[in-house]
Amino acid sequence: MKRKIHLLAAVFFTALSTFAQGNGIGGITDATNMVTSYFDPGTQLIYAIGAVVGLIGGIKVYNKFSSGDPDTGKTAASWFGACIFLIVAATILRSFFL
């Protein structure tokens, strides 16, 4: 009886390890497809965030310009730089990973 249990356990663990061993190519392919499917919506989201940040920056710069603040040029340059960074970052990330 004990010998049968040991034999059954050996067969079970051999079958289990056989199912666990695989080359993993199917899993890697599925993971790659899942990650690349998120890039288009992610890129659109970054562009939308850039548009909102640009509008807020434009309003802020307009308010500073209207009030006669001498620091208007620096504020405009920083907001413009932030918008350009978001657009360039989205484009570069897309070109790296797709």
Image (cartoon, grey):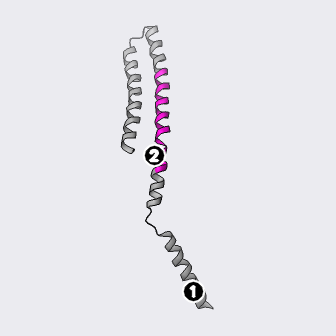
**Which residue sits at x=46%, y=20%?**
57
Region in magenta: 33-55
> Can residue 27 be seen at all in this image of the molecule?
yes
Answer left or right for 6 relative to 30: right
Type of residue at label 2? Answer: Thr
Quarter holding the N terminus is bottom right
**Helix, strand or loop under label 1:** helix
Quarter holding the C terminus is top left
The dot on residue 6 is 1
Type of residue at label 1? Answer: His
What is the distance, in whole Å, between disc 1 and disc 2 at their CAs? 47 Å
17 to 7, vertically: above or below:
above
55 to 4, vertically: above or below:
above
| Residue annotated with mark 2 | 36
The dot on residue 78 is none
Q: Position of residue 22 (x, y in %)?
A: 46, 67
**Helix, strand or loop under label 2:** helix
